[in-house]
Amino acid sequence: MSDGFSMRVDEDDLRDFIGKLDGLSAIDFGLGLWAGGLVVEAAGKENIIYYDFIDTGATLNTTAAEMVGDTEVHIGPETEYAIFGELGIGQSEKPFMREAIDMNRDTILQAIANTLRGLIRGAAS
């Protein structure tokens, strides 16, 4: 994905902050990122339906969040032609994934924060 399609949360800064709290440095930040990725996945699917970017259903059905290692979540469809609709190449633009991120930033960050809060509370008790 290009920079226009991504959102970064600096795990090292989060780990440094959490590391200052006694006994909490083993928090699995990937779970927080996964929660944010699921928000983007759901919004992307809603947008595919909204833009009526459905022919066979392959773009909708292959749009998924996938953990890559411990610190990345990749979200998007696996169809070769989805990018043409997203960017409007040879057809009208249907920015279903860009809008999934841009229009849900607060919800994405809230999902990450809520998940991390739960993990912190669990580790602190």
Image: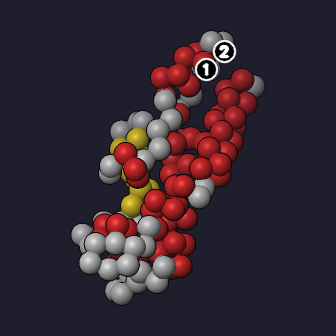
Q: CA distance from mark 2 to mark 1?
A: 5 Å
Mark seen at residue 60: none
Q: Position of residue 35 (x, y in %)?
A: 57, 49
Q: Quadrant of residue 78?
A: bottom left
Residue shown at the point (32%, 51%) measured from the top left: 1
Q: Position of residue 39 (x, y in %)?
A: 57, 57
Residue 77: quarter of image = bottom left
Query: Label 2: which residue?
Result: 21
The amino acid sitting under disc 1 is Ile
Residue at figure coordinates x 36%, y 39% from the top left: 69
Q: Is residue 86 visible?
A: yes
Residue at 65% over, 52% down: 107
- Determine whether, in the image, residue 69 is placed left or right of residue 106: left
Label 1: few (<14), some (14–19) or many (≥20) C-alpha neighbours in 10 Å = some
Task: Tell me, yes or no, if residue 59 can be seen here.
Answer: no
Q: Name the foreground residue: 28 vs 65.
A: 65
Answer with left or right where residue 32 lies relative to residue 60.
right
Q: Where is residue 52? Give x, y as percent.
A: 46, 83
> Are the residues tagged 2 and 1 within 8 Å (C-beta)?
yes
Give the answer, above or below, for where 60 lies relative to 55: above
Viewer-proximal residue among 10 and 94: 94
**Placement of 68 over or under 88, stated as above or below:** above
Residue visible at 52% across and 61% down in the picture: 100
Residue under pointer 1 = 18
The correct choice, above or below, for 81 with respect to 14 in the image is below
The x, y position of residue 80, in whole percent, is 24, 69
Instruction: Kindly state the secondary structure of the residue where label 2 is placed.
Output: loop
The amino acid marked with disc number 2 is Leu
Color encoding of the figure = secondary structure
Left/right of residue 35 with respect to residue 52 in the rendered view: right
Mark 1 falls on what kind of element? helix
Label 2: how many Cα within 10 Å (few below 14, some 14–19, many 20+): few
